[in-house]
Image (tube, rainbow, N blue to C red):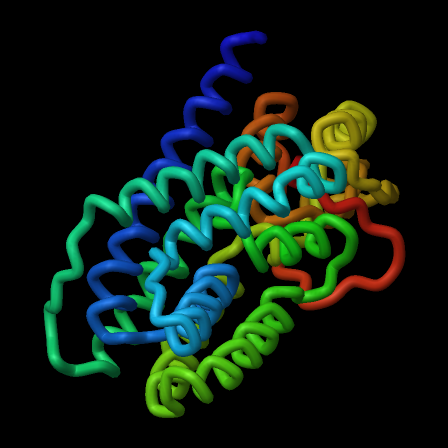
Amino acid sequence: MDKKEVIHNVRSVILVIMSALIYSIAIRVFIDSANLIPAGFIGLSLIVVKIVELFTHITIPYMLLYFIFQCSLITLVFKIIGKRFALLSILQFTLTTIFSVFIPVISLSDDIILLALFGGVLTGTAVLLALIGEASTGGTDFVAVYFQNKSNIPIWDYVMFFNWGILVFAGFFMGIEAALYSMVFQFVSTTLVTTFNSRNRLVSLTIITTKGDEISRLLMESTRHGVTVSDAKGAFTNTHKQMLYTVMNQFEVNSVIHDIRLLDPNVFINVSRSEKIYGNFRKKKIS
């Protein structure tokens, strides 16, 4: 394992630890104190606990059930997504469970809307940090990452609708008002993820250079994306150049531009956002 890979792994672990801590704070300080219903596996765990409590009067810690649900999926995640992703995700939800045991329920406000909004912001931040660290918070996020790897579909919106379905069902056991407040919480969280998750955003690079062959090789080797090369001519300088066009994920752009400018300090690069693409595009997978 080289130095670059070690730094990459340490960075991922730090991001996952931060994600777990923030997620635990969101659960204990905002979700639990406002009696909100978290969606995903935590929400399912809470529903099962409430049903068991209703019919047997036995109380089970819902975070324990959440941990069991997560573990039941992890073998499948190893196979269909990847070992590194699975191990980092195990670390995330294990730490979330542990932190949640030690963080007390603290009521910061009696305003449930305020708690739902800030709880959603913290939860969305926790999910984003996990994704940046190439992990997830587990549960429905496993499904989202799987489909994100397979296609360009904005899967997080579908995850939100699925979670809303869980909340509607939970409303029958825990009250419709709690379910409605929880939908606000879920909307804020998902909107934050879809807005700031750079893996969902594609950008186009138009590159004008005198070193088209070297830069196109660099792009294909470092990003595995295709490059279109055409001849160009500078109207002011009357110099023959090459114009390169490629599409990539936003999180790849900074390192790519840095490498291009090392090859050609005089390069001209235009970066523009791509709203939609059709055709063959290789998205870098989380694995």
The N terminus lies in which quarter of the figure? top right
Can the viewer see residue 189 in this picture?
Answer: no
Residue at far top of view: 2
Q: Is residue 214 above or below residue 51?
A: above
Q: Quadrant of residue 85?
A: top right
The residue at the point 35 percent across, 36 percent down is 17
Depth order, front residue of 165/214: 165
The residue at the point 59 percent across, 36 percent down is 86
Query: Total number of numbered labels?
Result: 0
Q: In which quarter of the image is residue 215?
A: top right
Question: For this view, does 30 lie left or right of residue 97?
Answer: left
Q: Position of residue 11 (x, y in %)?
A: 42, 28
Residue at far front of view: 56
Q: Where is residue 212 in the image (x, y as percent from the top left)?
A: 79, 31
The residue at the point 50 percent across, 85 percent down is 168
Depth order, front residue of 113/178: 178
Q: Position of residue 105 (x, y in %)?
A: 17, 60
The residue at the point 61 percent across, 51 percent down is 142
Q: Is residue 47 above or below residue 209?
A: below
The C terminus lies in which quarter of the figure? top right
Q: Is residue 70 above or below residue 39?
A: above
Depth order, front residue of 19/273: 19
Can the viewer see residue 55 in this picture?
Answer: yes
Question: For this view, does 114 lie left or right of residue 106?
Answer: right
